C-alpha cells in the first residue's frame, strides 16, 4: 500500500501545470525524434543534456522520460510507413507493419501500434510501481561486492547478447571503459590517461561522450552513406480499427507487455530481444498463420506492446539500482549524475518527490501520447519527408551547440570530434554503441565498488565473494559465459 | 535510431580462409585496439603507487586489466577477421550501404566542424553556427540558394538568443558583441 500512497503523492507533483508542460514538451519532442530518420531518443536526450543543466531536476527528468516514451511511439510510425527499419527496437514492427501499409491497412497498423503502446505502457508502468520498491527493499542490503558483481554481469550481458559478434561487443565495452578511465583517480589523486593535459584532469565530460557517440558519430556515418534515391513514404490516413482488428489485437498487446517488462529490466539492452520474442510468439499462436509475412496485425500489435513495456522495465534497475540496461537509460543516468544524484535504493528515500513524480508522469505521458498519436498521425508522417540536408546539418549544429555550452571551451569541441570519429568507426566496423556508453558510465562506478569491497577485507579477494548475492550473480555470469562458449557453437552447427 | 545494433547474424567461421574476402580495414581496427591497449598499460605503469596509495587496490589495477583485455581482444579480433568473420556495418533509414563511402563529403564536414569550432571564440557563436549549418546543408546536397542561408541564420541566431536570454547559458557573441 505504501507504493500506492507514494504514487498518489507523485501524481500530486506530476499534475502541477509546470510539470504537465514539461511532460507534454517531452512526449512531443520524443514523437518527433522517434519519427525523424537518423535520430532516436538516446540522441535527443544526449543533445538536451546541456540545455537542462539550468532546469530543475524533476522537470528535466520528466521531460526525458517523455522523450523516451514518445520515441517508442514515433519509431513505430517510421517503421510502418517507410520500408527500412531504422531503430533496432522497431525492426520486428516493420516486418508486418510495412506489409499492412502497402496493402492499404496503414491506418489499422498505426492504430494497433498506438493503442497497444498505450495499453502495454500503462500495464508496465503499473508493474514498475510495485517492482521498483521491491527491488529497493532487496537492494538496501547490498554491499560494494554485490554491486561490483552486478555491474560485471551487466557488462558481460550487454556485450554478449547485443550484436552479432561477442568480440566486437567486448571491444566496444573496453573502449568505453578506457574513456571512463581518463582523468584524476578519485581515490589517490593520480592523473590517468590525461597526457599532462589539464583539460582532461576532470575526465571526459559525459555530455561529450554521449553527443559524440550518438549524435556526431551517427550524423557522420549517415552523411558518408546518404541514400541517393528519395525514400518512399506510404501515405496513411487517420488511424482506426474495426471490431475484428480489436479482437485480434488485444491478446498480443497483453502478451507483449508480459514479455517486454521483464526483459527491459534485465541488462540485455532494452527492446531488441522482447520484440523479437513477441513476434515469434504471435506468429506461432496466430489463427491465420498464412497471413504472417503479408501484413498480419498481430505481428504489429505484439512487438509494439513489448517495445513500450520494455521501456518501463528499463526504469526498474535504473531507479532502484542505478544500473542502466539500455542506451537511453545510460544517458538518463548521466543526467542524474550531473544533478549530483546517484540513482539507487537511497534515491527513493532521499528524493521521493522526484522519483514518484517521474513515475506518475509516465502514466500521464502515455495518455498524452495516445491522444497525440491517434488523431495527429498523418501530421507526424509528414516529418518523414523533411529535406535530409537540413536534418543532418541540424544534428551537426546542435552537437556543437550542446558540447560548447558545457564549458565554453574549444578543446571540448575537439574532444567531441574525436569521440564522433570513434562513433563513426564503431558503426563502420559493427561495434555496438550500447556496451561502450555503459562502459563509460558504469566503469568508474564499478572500479569504486571493487576498491571499496577489497578495502573492507584488506585486499583479500574473498571480499568479492563473501556474500550470497555476489556468489549468485557470479554463478549467473558463469552460465552466461558457458552459453556463449558452447551454446552459440551448438546453434551454428545445426 | 542511434542505438541500432547490427542485424543479428552469426558470422560463419567455417570454410577455408583463403576463399573469403578479408577486410584489411578490420585488421586496422585490431591494430588500433592493440595500440590503445598498449597505451593504457604504459600509462598505468607510470603511475606511482607508493606515494599516496590508499587501500589494497591502487590506481593501476583496473587500467592494467582494461589495457590487457584490449590487447587480447585485438588479437582475437584479428584472428576472427583472418578466419573470415566480419563486422556488420550499421544500417538505417537514410543509409545506403551499396555505394562506397562518400569521402569528399565526409572530409568537408569534418573540416567545416573544425573550422566553425575554432572560429567560435573570434567570430562568435551566431556567425560560426550559421556557417556550419549552411555549409553542412550545401555539402549534404542542399540546393536552395536563397532559403538555405536564411534557415541556417535563423536556427543559429535563434538558438543563440534562446540560450543566452532564456536559458542563461553564456555563448560568445564575438564580432557581433554589442549588436545582439
Image (spheres, coloured by chain):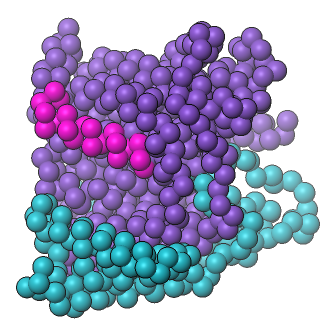
Chain colours: A purple, B cyan
Q: Quadrant of residue A242?
A: top right
Q: Quadrant of residue B60?
A: bottom left
Q: Left or right: where does residue B89 sit relative to residue B147? A: right
Q: Left or right: where does residue A418 sit relative to residue A190? A: right
Judge whether A361 appears above or below A453 on screen.
above
Q: Position of residue A73 (x, y in %)?
A: 46, 36
Judge whether A146 appears above or below A384 on screen.
above
Q: Residue at x 10, y 65 (%)?
A: B165
Q: Residue at x 16, y 80 (%)?
A: B172
Q: Residue at x 61, y 76 (%)?
A: B31
Q: Residue at x 73, y 47 (%)?
A: B9
Q: Position of residue A4 (x, y in %)?
A: 20, 13
Q: Position of residue B56 (x, y in %)?
A: 26, 56
Q: Position of residue A91 (x, y in %)?
A: 62, 41
Q: Quadrant of the N terminus of chain A?
A: top left
Residue A202 can be seen, yes or no: no
Q: Left or right: where does residue B25 sit relative to residue A349? A: right
**Of all residues shown, which one is farthest toward the front?**
B146
Please name the predominant secondary structure of the magenta segment in the image: helix
Q: Left or right: where does residue A364 sit relative to residue A84? A: left
Q: Is residue B49 magenta?
A: no
Amino acid at each position: 500500500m505504501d507504493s500506492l500512497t507514494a504514487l498518489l503523492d507523485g501524481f500530486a507533483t506530476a499534475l502541477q501545470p509546470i510539470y504537465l508542460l514539461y511532460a507534454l514538451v517531452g512526449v512531443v519532442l520524443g514523437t518527433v525524434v522517434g519519427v525523424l530518420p537518423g535520430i532516436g531518443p538516446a540522441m535527443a536526450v544526449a543533445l538536451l543534456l546541456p540545455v537542462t543543466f539550468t532546469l530543475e531536476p524533476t522537470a528535466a527528468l520528466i521531460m526525458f522520460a517523455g522523450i523516451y516514451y514518445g520515441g517508442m511511439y514515433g519509431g513505430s510510425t517510421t517503421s510502418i510507413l517507410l520500408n527500412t527499419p531504422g531503430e533496432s527496437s522497431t525492426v520486428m514492427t516493420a516486418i508486418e507493419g510495412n506489409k499492412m501499409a502497402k496493402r492499404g491497412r496503414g491506418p489499422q497498423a498505426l492504430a494497433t501500434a498506438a493503442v497497444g503502446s498505450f495499453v502495454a505502457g500503462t500495464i508496465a508502468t503499473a508493474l514498475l510501481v510495485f517492482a521498483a520498491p521491491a527491488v529497493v527493499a532487496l537492494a538496501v542490503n547490498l554491499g560494494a561486492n554485490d554491486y561490483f558483481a552486478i555491474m560485471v554481469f551487466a557488462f558481460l550481458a550487454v556485450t554478449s547478447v547485443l550484436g552479432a559478434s561477442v568480440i566486437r561487443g567486448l571491444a566496444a565495452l573496453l573502449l568505453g571503459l578506457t574513456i571512463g578511465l581518463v582523468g584524476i583517480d578519485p581515490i589517490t589523486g593520480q592523473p590517468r590517461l590525461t597526457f599532462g593535459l589539464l583539460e582532461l584532469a576532470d575526465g571526459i565530460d559525459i555530455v561529450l561522450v554521449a553527443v559524440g557517440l550518438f549524435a556526431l558519430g551517427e550524423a557522420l556515418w549517415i552523411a558518408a552513406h546518404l541514400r541517393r534515391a528519395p525514400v518512399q513514404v506510404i501515405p496513411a490516413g487517420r488511424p482506426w480499427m474495426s471490431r475484428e482488428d480489436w479482437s485480434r489485437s488485444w491478446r498480443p498487446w497483453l502478451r507483449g507487455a508480459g514479455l517486454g517488462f521483464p526483459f527491459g529490466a534485465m541488462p540485455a539492452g532494452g527492446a531488441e530481444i522482447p520484440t523479437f520474442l513477441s513476434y515469434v510468439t504471435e506468429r506461432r499462436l496466430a489463427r491465420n498463420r498464412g497471413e504472417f509475412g503479408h501484413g498480419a496485425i498481430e505481428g504489429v500489435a505484439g512487438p509494439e506492446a513489448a517495445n513500450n513495456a520494455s521501456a518501463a522495465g528499463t526504469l526498474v534497475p535504473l531507479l532502484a539500482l542505478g544500473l542502466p540496461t539500455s542506451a537511453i537509460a545510460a544517458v538518463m543516468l548521466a543526467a542524474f549524475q550531473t544533478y549530483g544524484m546517484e540513482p539507487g535504493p537511497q534515491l527513493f528515500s532521499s528524493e521521493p518527490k522526484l522519483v514518484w513524480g517521474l513515475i506518475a508522469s509516465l502514466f500521464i505521458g502515455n495518455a498524452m501520447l495516445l491522444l497525440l498519436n491517434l488523431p495527429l498521425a498523418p501530421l507526424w508522417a509528414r516529418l518523414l519527408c523533411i529535406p535530409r540536408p537540413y536534418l543532418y546539418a541540424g544534428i551537426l549544429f546542435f552537437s556543437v551547440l550542446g558540447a560548447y555550452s558545457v564549458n565554453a571551451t574549444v578543446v571540448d569541441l575537439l574532444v567531441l570530434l574525436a569521440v564522433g570519429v570513434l562513433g563513426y568507426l564503431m558503426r563502420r566496423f559493427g561495434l555496438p554503441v550500447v556496451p561502450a556508453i555503459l562502459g563509460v558510465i558504469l566503469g568508474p562506478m564499478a572500479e569504486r565498488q571493487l576498491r571499496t569491497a577489497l578495502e573492507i577485507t584488506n585486499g583479500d579477494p574473498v571480499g568479492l565473494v563473501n556474500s550470497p548475492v555476489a556468489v549468485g550473480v557470479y554463478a549467473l555470469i558463469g552460465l552466461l559465459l558457458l552459453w556463449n562458449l558452447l551454446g552459440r557453437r551448438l546453434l551454428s552447427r545445426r | 535510431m542511434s542505438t541500432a545494433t547490427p542485424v543479428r547474424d552469426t558470422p560463419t567461421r567455417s570454410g577455408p580462409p583463403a576463399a573469403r574476402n578479408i577486410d584489411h580495414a578490420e585488421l586496422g581496427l585490431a591494430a588500433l585496439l592493440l595500440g590503445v591497449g598498449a597505451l593504457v598499460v604504459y600509462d598505468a605503469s607510470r603511475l606511482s603507487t607508493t606515494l599516496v596509495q590508499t587501500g589494497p587496490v591502487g590506481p593501476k589495477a583496473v587500467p592494467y586489466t582494461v589495457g590487457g583485455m584490449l590487447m587480447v581482444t585485438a588479437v582475437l579480433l584479428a584472428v576472427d577477421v583472418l578466419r573470415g568473420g566480419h563486422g556488420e556495418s550499421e544500417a538505417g533509414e537514410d543509409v545506403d550501404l551499396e555505394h562506397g563511402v562518400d569521402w569528399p563529403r565526409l572530409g568537408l564536414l569534418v573540416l567545416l566542424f573544425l573550422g566553425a569550432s575554432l572560429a567560435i571564440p573570434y567570430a562568435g557563436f551566431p556567425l560560426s553556427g550559421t556557417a556550419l549549418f549552411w555549409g553542412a546543408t550545401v555539402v549534404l546536397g542542399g540546393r536552395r540558394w536563397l532559403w538555405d542561408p536564411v534557415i541556417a541564420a535563423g536556427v543559429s541566431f535563434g538558438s543563440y538568443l534562446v540560450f543566452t536570454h532564456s536559458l542563461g547559458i553564456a555563448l560568445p557573441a564575438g564580432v557581433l558583441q554589442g549588436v545582439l
